[in-house]
Image: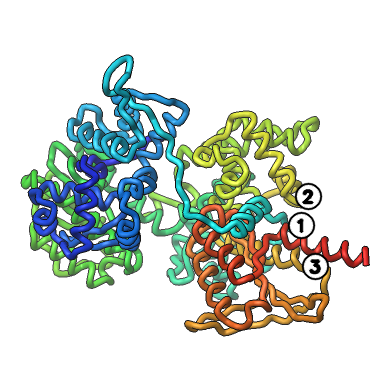
C-alpha cells in the first residue's frame, strides 16, 4: 500500500539516545526549539529535527513552537524511570509507525535483507520521490532506528556487503497477567460473536413517509409543492430527503422542483438503491458536499474558459497541505471553501490556508487567496477576523466569490483590498444547472460497487448455485463484492471491518476492494452462512426481485442515513432478547437504576431471579465498533465494583468491537477476576444456563 507522505513526516534524527533526551527536555519544561537545543547540546535547527522525531513517536505536540507532553509521553517518561532499558521500551512505538509497520510486513517471511532493498521498500510504501535526496536521507533514519533497537542487525559475515541485515521479528512483551485473567481473556475471545443474526427485518420506512414521497414526486408546480410540504411532518421530511438536507436547512422550492425532475431521469434499480445507501453514509449527496464540488467545478470552468493551465491538489515542496488549485504560469494559488453554516470546521479551513500561504516565504511573487461560497463564513465573525489577519500579515492576497469568478479573469487576480463585508447574494452558488443530488458523477469505487451489484444479480439467477456457492463464486471473482454485500445487509463499514478482522484477519486491509484468494473467501462465506438468519439470507437472494419505484430511491436516503443508527441500537436489543431466551431463570422486565460515585449512573437491561431467590441485574452491551464507549463502560464497572452492590450485577458483552480495545478488555477482565465481578459473552451466558438446566434435570 502506498502512503501519501511528505518528507517532513519522516524524522531526520538518527540518534535515539538524543531523541529520548529531547523528550526529557520537554518533560523538564523546555518548550521552544532554542530551549530544547540548549538542553540537548545541539543547534536550534537540529533540535527541531529531534523534536519532530518525538512528535512522530506520539510523545509530544508542538503548537507555535511550544512543545508539551501528550498522555502517551507522560506514560513513557514514567516507564523510563521504572525500566533502565529505554531502547527496549521504544520498540512498540517505533514498530507501530505506519511506514515501518508496512515495510516490516513486506519482509516478514525473509530472514535477511540488504540495506538497498529495505530503502527501496521504504520509498515504495512512502510514495516519496526516489530522486529527492532529503527523502532518502530521512528514510535512512528508520533503518538507523531499527538497528539501534535490535530489529535489524548488521551481518558481519555477510556474503555480499557489510550492509546486509538480519531481520529480528518483533514480539510484544506484555506485563505478567494473572492466570485467572488469562483464562477469562482466552475464553472471552474464543466465544466472541462477530454478528448477531436478526430473525426479523425490522428496518423499514414508515408508510406515511413513503406515501408522502410518492405524492410529492407527482407534483410539478412550485405553489403546489409549497402547500404540500406544510401538510404534515411526513411531507416536510419527504422534501428534505429529496433535497438531502437537514431539519435546520431551509427548503428551496425551486431546487425541490428541479430535484424531482432530476430524479425522474434516473432508473429505480437495485444498483441505484445501493449507490444511494453508500452515498448517504458518506454524506456524499448532501448540500455541503454538492456546494464544495459546485465551487470547485466553478473554478475549473473559470480556468478553462480563460485558457489558463492549472493543477488540482498540488503540493508545494516542504508544505504539509495540498492547495486546491495552482496555476504555474500565473503564480496563482487558490484554496476553495464552501460553507452553509458557521462552526468549528472553519478553524480547520483557516489552518489549511495558513499552511498553504507559507509558499510565499520562498516565493513572495506568488498570489495566494481563497474562493468562498455559502453564507457560513459571513456569519462566523471569528473566522472573518482570522481571514483579515492573514491578509494584513501579507499571507493571503485576495478573497474571491462566485460573483468575482463570473466577472474577473485569472489574469486579473492580484493583491486586492480586503472587503469590509460581502453580500449574501454574491456567495450564492447556482447549483441548479451544475449539480443535482441525483446526478453526481460516480467515483471509481462507486462504479466498482455498481458492477459488483450487477454480477450478484447474474449469479443469483443461476438455480444450481446454493447460498454458499453463490457467495463463494461472486466474492472470489468480483471486486467490491464485500462492500456490496454489507450494504444489502445494512452493515456499516466498521461493522464489516470488525467481522473481517475476526474471521479472516489477513484480509482486513484489502476487503474494501477485493478478497480473491480461495481459502479466505471460503472461510468468510462459511462464517457468514453460519451467522446470518434465514431472513437475512433471503434478503440477499431476493434483493433483485423487488419492483422498485422512484419513491424507493428517495426512501433509501432515510434508511441509509438513519438505518445504521437503528441497526446499531437493534444489536443491543437482539442481545437482550437472546439473553432472555437462553435464561433458565425467571425474568423480571423491571429496569433498575443505580447511582454510582462521580455522578455516574448504571441501568439494567433486565433482571432475573436465581435459584436462591436473589434478584440479579443484567447489563447487555454489544459493540460492532471500537472507541471510547468501551473505555466508558470499563470506568462504569470500576465505579460499580467500589460499591456494595457489585454482587447484584452481571455484565454480558459481546461483538467484534472488543478486538480493537485490547487494553480496555484486559482492564475489564482484571476487574472480573480481582473483584469477582461477573463478565460474560453471549456464548458463556448460554453455557452457564445450559449447565444449570442440566443440574436441575439430574437432581
Quadrant housing residue 636: bottom right
- In the rendered image, the vertical position of residue 370 relative to residue 240, given as above or below: above
- The quarter of the rendered structure image containing the C terminus is bottom right
Helix, strand or loop at label 1? It is: loop
| Image mark for residue 534 | 2
- Quote the CA–CA distance across marks 3 and 1: 19 Å
Mark 2 or 3 closer to N-term? 2
Q: Which class describes the residues within 10 Å of circle 1: few (<14), some (14-19), or many (20+)?
A: few
Residue 631 screen position, x and y as percent: 50, 66
Of 363 and 236, nearer the camera is 363
- Using the numbered discs, state the Cα–Cα distance from disc 2 to disc 3 in whole angstroms: 23 Å
The outermost residue toward the top is 159
- Residue at image position (21%, 67%) is 384
- Residue 159: x and y in percent read 33, 15
Whichever of callouts 3 and 1 sits on the residue coming sooner in the sequence is 1
Q: Secondary structure at mark 3?
A: loop
Q: Nearer the viewer, mark 3 or mark 1?
A: 3
Residue occupying image coordinates x 69% and y 81%: 591
CA gap between label 1 and label 2 equals 7 Å
Residue for badge 3 = 583
Q: Residue at x 67, y 77 (%)?
A: 647
Residue in the foreground of this view, choosing between 630 and 322: 630
Could you tell me if the residues under marks 1 and 2 are in contact, i.e. CB atoms within 8 Å?
yes
Check the image and report above or below for 44 versus 127. below
Rendered location of residue 555, percent (x, y): 61, 58
- The spot of residue 423 in percent (x, y) is 23, 67
Mark carried by residue 456: none
Is residue 137 among the parts visible in the rendering? yes
> Mark 1 = which residue?
199
Which secondary structure, mark 2? helix
Give the mark nearest the N terminus, 1 or 2. 1
Q: Would you identify the image quadrant in which residue 680 lies?
A: bottom right
Amino acid at each position: 500500500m502506498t502512503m501519501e507522505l511528505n518528507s517532513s513526516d519522516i524524522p531526520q534524527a538518527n540518534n535515539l539516545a538524543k531523541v529520548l533526551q529531547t523528550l526529557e527536555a520537554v518533560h523538564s519544561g523546555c518548550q521552544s526549539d532554542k530551549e530544547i537545543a540548549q538542553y540537548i547540546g545541539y543547534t536550534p535547527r537540529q533540535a527541531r529535527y529531534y523534536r519532530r522525531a518525538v512528535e512522530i513517536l506520539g510523545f509530544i505536540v508542538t503548537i507555535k513552537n511550544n512543545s508539551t507532553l501528550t498522555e502517551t509521553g507522560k506514560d513513557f517518561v514514567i516507564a523510563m524511570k521504572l525500566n533502565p532499558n529505554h531502547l527496549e521500551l521504544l520498540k512498540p512505538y517505533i514498530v507501530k509507525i505506519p511506514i515501518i509497520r508496512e515495510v516490516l510486513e513486506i519482509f516478514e517471511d525473509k530472514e535477511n535483507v540488504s540495506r538497498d532493498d529495505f530503502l527501496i521498500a521504504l520509498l515504495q510504501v512512502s510514495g516519496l520521490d526516489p530522486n529527492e535526496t532529503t527523502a532518502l536521507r530521512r528514510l535512512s533514519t528508520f533503518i538507523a532506528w531499527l538497528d539501534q533497537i535490535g530489529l535489524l542487525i548488521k551481518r558481519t559475515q555477510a556474503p555480499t556487503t557489510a550492509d546486509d541485515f538480519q531481520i529480528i521479528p518483533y514480539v510484544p512483551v506484555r506485563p505478567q497477567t494473572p492466570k485467572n485473567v488469562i483464562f477469562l481473556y482466552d475464553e472471552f475471545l474464543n466465544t466472541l460473536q462477530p454478528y448477531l443474526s436478526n430473525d426479523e427485518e425490522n428496518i423499514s420506512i414508515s408508510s406515511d413517509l413513503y406515501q408522502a414521497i410518492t405524492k410529492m414526486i407527482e407534483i410539478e408546480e412550485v405553489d403546489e409543492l409549497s402547500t404540500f410540504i406544510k401538510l404534515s411532518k411526513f411531507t416536510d421530511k419527504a422534501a428534505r430527503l429529496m433535497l438531502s438536507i437537514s431539519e435546520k436547512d431551509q427548503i428551496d422550492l425551486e431546487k425541490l422542483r428541479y430535484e424531482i425532475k432530476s430524479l425522474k431521469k434516473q432508473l429505480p434499480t437495485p444498483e441505484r438503491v445501493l449507490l444511494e445507501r453508500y452515498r448517504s453514509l458518506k454524506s456524499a449527496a448532501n448540500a455541503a458536499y454538492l456546494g464544495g464540488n459546485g465551487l470547485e467545478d466553478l473554478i475549473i470552468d473559470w480556468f478553462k474558459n480563460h485558457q489558463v493551465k492549472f493543477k488540482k491538489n498540488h503540493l508545494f515542496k516542504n508544505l504539509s497541505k495540498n492547495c486546491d488549485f495552482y496555476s504555474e504560469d500565473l503564480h496563482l494559488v487558490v484554496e476553495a471553501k464552501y460553507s452553509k453554516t458557521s462552526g468549528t470546521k472553519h478553524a480547520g479551513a483557516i489552518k489549511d490556508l495558513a499552511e498553504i500561504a507559507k509558499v510565499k516565504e520562498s516565493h513572495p511573487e506568488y498570489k495566494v487567496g481563497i474562493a468562498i461560497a455559502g453564507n457560513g463564513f459571513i456569519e462566523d465573525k471569528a473566522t472573518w477576523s482570522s481571514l483579515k489577519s492573514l491578509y494584513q500579515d501579507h499571507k493571503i492576497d485576495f478573497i474571491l466569490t462566485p460573483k468575482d469568478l463570473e466577472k474577473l479573469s485569472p489574469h486579473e487576480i492580484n493583491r486586492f483590498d480586503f472587503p469590509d463585508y460581502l453580500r449574501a447574494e454574491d456567495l450564492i452558488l447556482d447549483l441548479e444547472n451544475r449539480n443535482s443530488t441525483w446526478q453526481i458523477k460516480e467515483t471509481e469505487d462507486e462504479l466498482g460497487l455498481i458492477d459488483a451489484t450487477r454480477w450478484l444479480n447474474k449469479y443469483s439467477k443461476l438455480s444450481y448455485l446454493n447460498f454458499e456457492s453463490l457467495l463463494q463464486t461472486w466474492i472470489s471473482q468480483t471486486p467490491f463484492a464485500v462492500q456490496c454485500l454489507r450494504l444489502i445487509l445494512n452493515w456499516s463499514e466498521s461493522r464489516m471491518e470488525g467481522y473481517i478482522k475476526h474471521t479472516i484477519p489477513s484480509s482486513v486491509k484489502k476487503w474494501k476492494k477485493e478478497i480473491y484468494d480461495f481459502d479466505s473467501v471460503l472461510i468468510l462465506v462459511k462464517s457468514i452462512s453460519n451467522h446470518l438468519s434465514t431472513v437475512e439470507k433471503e434478503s440477499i437472494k431476493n434483493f433483485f426481485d423487488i419492483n422498485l419505484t422512484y419513491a424507493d430511491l428517495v426512501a433509501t436516503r432515510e434508511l441509509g442515513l438513519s438505518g445504521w443508527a437503528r441497526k446499531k441500537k437493534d444489536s443491543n436489543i437482539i442481545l437482550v432478547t437472546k439473553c432472555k431466551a437462553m435464561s433458565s431463570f425467571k425474568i423480571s422486565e423491571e429496569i433498575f437504576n443505580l447511582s454510582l460515585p462521580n455522578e455516574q449512573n448504571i441501568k439494567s437491561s433486565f433482571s432475573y431471579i436465581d435459584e436462591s431467590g436473589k434478584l440479579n441485574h443484567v447489563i447487555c452491551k454489544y459493540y460492532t465498533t471500537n472507541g471510547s464507549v468501551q473505555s466508558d463502560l470499563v470506568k462504569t464497572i470500576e465505579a460499580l465494583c467500589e460499591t456494595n452492590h457489585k454482587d447484584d450485577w452481571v455484565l454480558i458483552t459481546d461483538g467484534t468491537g472488543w478486538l480493537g480495545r485490547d487494553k480496555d478488555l484486559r482492564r475489564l477482565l482484571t476487574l472480573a477476576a480481582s473483584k469477582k465481578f461477573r463478565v460474560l459473552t453471549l456464548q458463556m451466558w448460554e453455557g452457564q444456563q445450559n449447565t444449570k438446566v442440566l443440574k436441575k434435570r439430574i437432581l
